[in-house]
Structures are given as structure tokens and as C-alpha cells.
Amino acid sequence: MKILFIQLPRQETSPEAASANVPLIPGRLVALATSLGLLLRDDCVILDDAVADHGGDAAVAAAAMGTGATLAVFVLFPWNLDRSIWLARKLRSMMPATWFAACGPEAVQGMPVFKAHAFDAIIEGECE
């Protein structure tokens, strides 16, 4: 199983927006899973910083498809919720054999992610 973690940055033109996009939740999940022997490090991919922070939707989609992931996990924050939902829907049509999941602070009851029907699974709250 290949797991891809995607955490998109704020959509601002300032360089601080991209540099503030540190994928701590994916890093912690990968570290925990590998330390417990649940996954090998090679089974987990965090989307490349340059692509996530500076690439457009086409670059993110191409990088995601290039991983061969069987599971794509989007980390949702207030600033990337809409774009993540849109991109997950787009990727679903391009990666039909891939499961899509969401986690993070915006993955809580009553939030738009539950009405979007873009993900196969939603891990409520911060999944670390």
C-alpha cells in the first residue's frame, strides 16, 4: 500500500504563505506508523514541498498521480478546505483505484467536508 499525504498551503502571493505550510500532521502519522511497524517508510509519501507550495492544481494532480498511491490523505485546514475538496474530486476521476481520506482541524461534524462527498473516509479532528 502506498499512502500519499497532501497538505495544501494558503492561497496568498506572499512567500510566507508557502513557508508556513509545514506538514506536521503527515510527518507525525508517518513516524508513528513506521515506529510501530505498521508501515514501511517507503509506503508513505508526503507531497513534495515545492509542488504543494508553489505548483498549481495541474502540478499537484500530476505529482499525486505519479506516486501510484492507493490511498490519498488530505490534511484540511480553514485555508485549504475548498481547494482540497475540489482537487480530491478532480483526482478521483483521474485515479479511480485510489481511496481518498481527509483529516485535520476542518474534518469535524458540521463542516462542509461532510457534505462535499469527495472523500471515502473522514478522520474527524486532528488525527495525530
Image: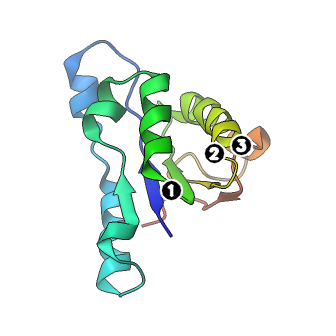
- In the displayed structure, does residue 22 sit left or right of residue 127? left
Rendered image quadrant of residue 106: top right
- To which residue does mark 1 refer? 69
Rendered image quadrant of residue 82: top right
Q: Is residue 59 visible?
A: yes
Q: Is residue 111 visible?
A: no
Q: Which mark is residue 95?
A: 2
- How packed mark 3 is, by other alpha carbons closer than 10 Å (few <14, some 14-19, many 20 or more), is many
Above/below status of 61 relative to 32? above
Residues at circles 1 and 3 in contact by the CB criterion of under 8 Å: no
Query: In terms of depth relative to the viewer, which is nearer, 21 or 95?
Result: 95
Under mark 3, the amino acid is: Ala
Above/below status of 19 relative to 47? above
- Which of the two marks, 1 or 3, is nearer to us in this view? 1
Q: At 21% from the left edge and 19% from the top edge, which residue is drawn? A: 15
- To which residue does mark 3 refer? 118
Under mark 2, the amino acid is: Met
Query: In terms of depth relative to the viewer, which is nearer, 78 or 24?
Result: 24
Residue 11 position in % (x across, y down) = 41, 20
